Image (tube, grey):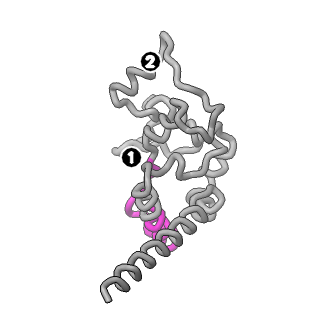
Amino acid sequence: MWKKAILGGLIAFVASYILFQIGYVATSGPYFCAQCHEVEKYVISWQQSPHNNLNCLECHQPRGELGKIHAKARGLNYLFQHFSGDFTVPTRAIVSDQNCLICHLGDRERYPNTVRLTNSAKVNHYETIQNSQSCLTCHRSTGHEVDMYLTPDLKGAKEQL
């Protein structure tokens, strides 16, 4: 009896995982994301960026399977905000430096022509990485020219530059 329960549980787990992966792929692209008016202007800006060959979650999710779950949980929150109109908790587009580095250090075989990080007299990317400085400090508008540029005190970061 317990063997049937274990087998049934295993089958349920595998089926759930397969369904999650199908849903993940179906809801991770820019055209799915652009269905909400809050994101449409970012998708239009992304189309004209150097990163227009990436899907949204290649930049906007933590790495790994747990990162996928994290991204989709955030997506459900955004969906709730969209349909309820309740934007009391600001939406944040998360970009992990790991997502930048995995491509720009040449670790993604899928993108062999990616511009590689280099060091110069003006910029030392090695030191930047060693000091845990965010890529977004200098490359804030790389994926999207359109951005709210808000600081935690709700002032425009562009105004402070």
Q: Secondary structure at mark 1?
A: loop
Q: Amino acid at mark 2?
A: Asn
For the point 58% across and 42% down, which residue is it? Answer: 144
Q: Residue furthest right?
A: 48
Q: Position of residue 107 (x, y in %)?
A: 52, 35
Magenta stretch: includes residue 140: no
Choose top left, top right, bottom left or bottom right for residue 28: bottom right
Q: Give the mark nearest the N terminus, 2 or 1.
A: 2
For the point 51% across and 73% down, which residue is it? Answer: 83
Q: How many marks?
A: 2
Magenta stretch: includes residue 88: yes
Disc 2 packing (10 Å; few <14; some 14–19; many ≥20): few
Q: Position of residue 88 (x, y in %)?
A: 39, 63
Disc 1 packing (10 Å; few <14; some 14–19; many ≥20): few
- 72 lies left or right of 109: left
Task: Give the number of the disc on residue 154.
Answer: 1
**Image depth: mark 2 or mark 1 in front:** 2
Q: CA distance from mark 2 to mark 1?
A: 31 Å
Looking at the picture, does residue 76 appear above or below residue 45? below
Tell me the magenta residue range.
74-94
Q: Secondary structure at mark 2?
A: loop
Q: Nearer the viewer, residue 152 or 63?
A: 63
- 144 lies left or right of 10: right
For the point 46% across and 72% down, which residue is it? Answer: 14
